[in-house]
Image (spheres, rainbow, N blue to C red):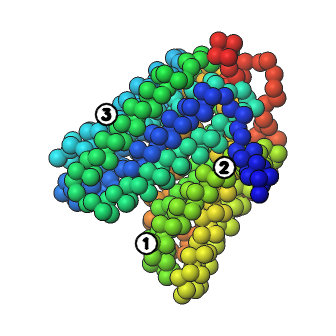
Amino acid sequence: MSRLLVRAFAGWRTGLSGPVTVLQAGTAINYFGYGLIVPFEIIYLHQARGFPTATAGLVLAAAMGAAAVATPPSGSLLDRFRAKPILIAGSLASGLGYAGFAFVERPWQAFVCSAVGGAGLGVTNTANRVLGLALVTAEQRPSLFALGRVAGNFGIGSGATVAGFIVASVQHLRAFQALYLFDAITCAALALIVLVAVPNPRLANAAAPSDSGTGFRAVARDRLFLILIAANIVLLAIGPALFQSILPPFATAHTPVGPGEIGVIIFLNTFFIVVAQIPATRVVKRMRRTHAFAATGALFAVGLLAVLLATLTRSTPAATTVLAGVAIVIAIGECAQSTVLGPVVADLAPPHLLGRYMSLYSLAFTAALALGPAVGGAVLATSPDAVWWGGALVAALIGAGFLLSGDRIPEPLAATASNAPGDPTPEAA
C-alpha cells in the first residue's frame, strides 16, 4: 500500500519552482471565488434583484464580452511591460467589478459591474499565463499549463459546490451578497500573493527582426498559429463546451437522468481533470504533438457519440453510468489538449510577441464557451441527436487533419541556452 501511495504522489511531481506553485495556488483561490458566483448569477439577478431572465442572461454575457474585448490589448501591454503589475491590476479590477454586483439595484449598474469584472478577468488570465512562462524553462511548459488547468478546475469546482450548499439552505439576498464579496476577497488575495511571493522577471525579449514586423499584423501572418487556434476553438466548443452547456438540458429531456445525476456527472468530469491532469502530462509528453491533438479529437468524438447510448435505456442508473463514462472520456481529452496547446503556442511565439500570442490563446477559450452553447443550442432545438453525431463527426475530421499535418506542428524545444520566450533570464533565476 505504501509503495502505491508513493507512486501516486510521484506522479503529481511537476518539478516546478516554488514561486510557480505559489502563483498557481493563488490562481486556485481566485477561481474558488469565481466558482462561488458563476453558476448562480442569473438566479441572483432574477430572484433577488428582480431582473427579467433575459436581462440577467445579457448581464452574464456582457462579462464574457468584456473579457474578450480586453484580452488582445492586454497582450500588447504584456509585450511592453512586465506581467506581474498587469496581473495585480487586472485581479484588483475584477474584484472591484464583482464586489459591485453585491449592491446592484438596476440593470445598468449590473452591466457596468459586469464590464469591469469581465475586463479584469480577461487581463488577469493572460497576464497569469505570461508571468508563469517567465518563471519556467521550455521543458517545463507542459507542467505549467497542466498545473494551471488543475488550479482552475479545482477552484471552480469546489467553489460551485460550496455555493450550491449555501444557496440551497439560505436563499436570501445577504447570502448572495456574501458570495460576491467573498469572490472580491479572493481576487484581492491573488493580487497580494503575486505582490509578496512571486518574482517580477523580465522575459528574455529579443528585438523584432526587421522583416517580421510587430503588433497583431505580425501575428496574423503566422498561418500555422491561426489554423491551430481555429481548430482548437472548434474542438473546445464541441467537446467541453457542449458537455457543460448542452448535455444537461438534453439529458433531462431525452434520458431518465435528472438534475441530481447531472450534478454528479459534471462534478466527476471536473474531479477527474484535477486528479489526472498532472500524471497525464507525463504520458502526453511521450507523444508527438500531432498525435496528441488527434487523440483529443478521437476522444471527443467517442464521448459525444456515447451520449446517444444513454437515450437507449429507461434505467436511471444505466443512463447515469453511460454519461459518467462520457464525463471521463471528455476529461481525458481535455487533459491531453491542455498539455499540448499552451506549450505549442509559447514555442511558436517570437519573444517580442509572446503577450499577443498568449492573449489570442486565452481568447480561444472565451470564443469556444460562446460558440459551443450558441451553435449547440440552435441544433438542439431542431435535431437533438444531431448535436452529438454532428459534433463527433467534426471532432473526428479535425483529429484526422492533425494526423495529416505531418511535421508542421513543432515538437518541444530542446534545452538550450537560447532566449526562448519562456526561459527565465539570469535576473529571474
Number of labelled discs?
3
Q: Residue at x 52, y 63 (%)?
A: 266
Task: Classify 10 Å Cα crowding around label 3: few (below 14), some (14-19), many (20 and above).
Answer: many
Q: Residue at x 49, y 72 (%)?
A: 261
- Dot 3 corresponds to which residue? 96
Q: Does dot 1 land on a helix, a strand or a loop?
A: helix
Q: Residue at x 49, y 26 (%)?
A: 194
Residue type indicated by callout 2: Gln
Rendering quarter of residue 189: top left
Rendering quarter of residue 327: bottom right
Q: Percent from the top left, x then y, of residue 2?
A: 77, 53
What separation in Å lies between label 3 and label 2 (alpha carbons)? 32 Å
What separation in Å lies between label 2 and label 1 (alpha carbons)? 27 Å
Residue type indicated by callout 1: Pro
Task: Classify 10 Å Cα crowding around label 1: few (below 14), some (14-19), many (20 and above).
Answer: few
- Dot 1 corresponds to which residue? 259
Looking at the rendered image, the quarter that the C terminus falls into is top right
Residue 216 visible in rendering: no
Q: Between disc 3 and disc 1, whose residue precedes?
A: 3
Q: Is 281 on the left or on the right of 68, as rendered?
A: right
Q: Is 261 on the left or on the right of 282, as rendered?
A: left
- Dot 2 corresponds to which residue? 277
Q: Between disc 2 and disc 1, whose residue precedes?
A: 1
Q: Percent from the top left, x then y, of residue 128?
A: 53, 31
Q: Percent from the top left, x then y, of residue 110?
A: 25, 44
Figure check: 358 above or below 339 = above
Q: Does dot 3 land on a helix, a strand or a loop?
A: helix
Figure check: 75 above or below 177 = above
Q: Does dot 2 land on a helix, a strand or a loop?
A: helix
Q: Between disc 3 and disc 2, whose residue precedes?
A: 3
